[in-house]
Amino acid sequence: MNGRNGEALLKKIQALSFAKVETELYLDAHPDATGALEYYRNILRELDDAMTEYQNEYGPLFAEGVVGDRWTWVEGKWPWQLGIPDGKEEK
């Protein structure tokens, strides 16, 4: 696993998640803004793609992201531990 790529992908997911929430808030106040709605749909697609890519490479981001025939949620590093070498805690 390449921690740097995983970290970059997590940052992308965080940015897209932020944009998603902000756009939802905007649309709450401006429900007829067709440009904002199209932007929101694009953000949803990009976020789904980024989360799928991350989960395929590094494992589930959330418990509901577990796929396959066994429970893998607790295996491997957690997303926030990507930069920590195996067996060592960050201080």
Image (cartoon, rainbow, N blue to C red):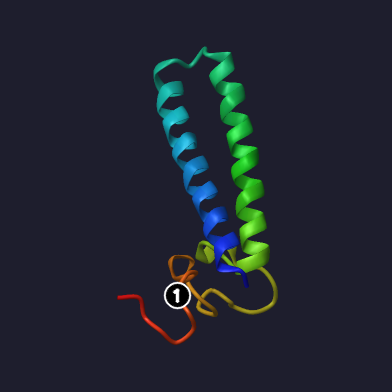
* Direction from residue 47 to residue 81 in the image, left or right: left
Residue drawn at x 58%, y 16% as measured from the top left? 35
- Secondary element under disc 1, as helix, strand or loop, is loop
Quarter containing the C terminus: bottom left
Please, which residue is most extreme toward the bottom here?
87
Q: Residue at x 54, y 80 (%)?
A: 75
Q: Which residue occupies 50% across, 78% down?
A: 74
Name which quarter of the figure residue 34 lies in. top right
Quadrant location of the N terminus?
A: bottom right
Crowd band around label 1 with a 10 angstrom C-alpha radius: few (<14), some (14–19), many (20+): few
Q: How many marks?
A: 1
Question: x, y (%) of residue 83?
Answer: 47, 70
In the image, residue 44 above or below residue 91: above
In the image, residue 14 sits, relative to residue 87, either above or below, namely above
Q: Is residue 86 above or below residue 12?
A: below
Residue 16: x percent and y percent?
52, 41
The residue at which mark 1 appears reads as 84
Where residue 19 sits in the image (x, y, percent)?
48, 35
Residue type at the position of mark 1: Ile
Quick check: 72 left or right of 11?
right
Residue 52 position by quadrant: bottom right
| Picture quadrant where residue 5 is located | bottom right
> Which one is nearer the viewer's eye here, 15 or 83?
83
- Nearer to the camera, 7 or 36: 7
The single residue placed furthest to the left in the displayed view is: 91
Residue at image x 62%, y 23%?
38
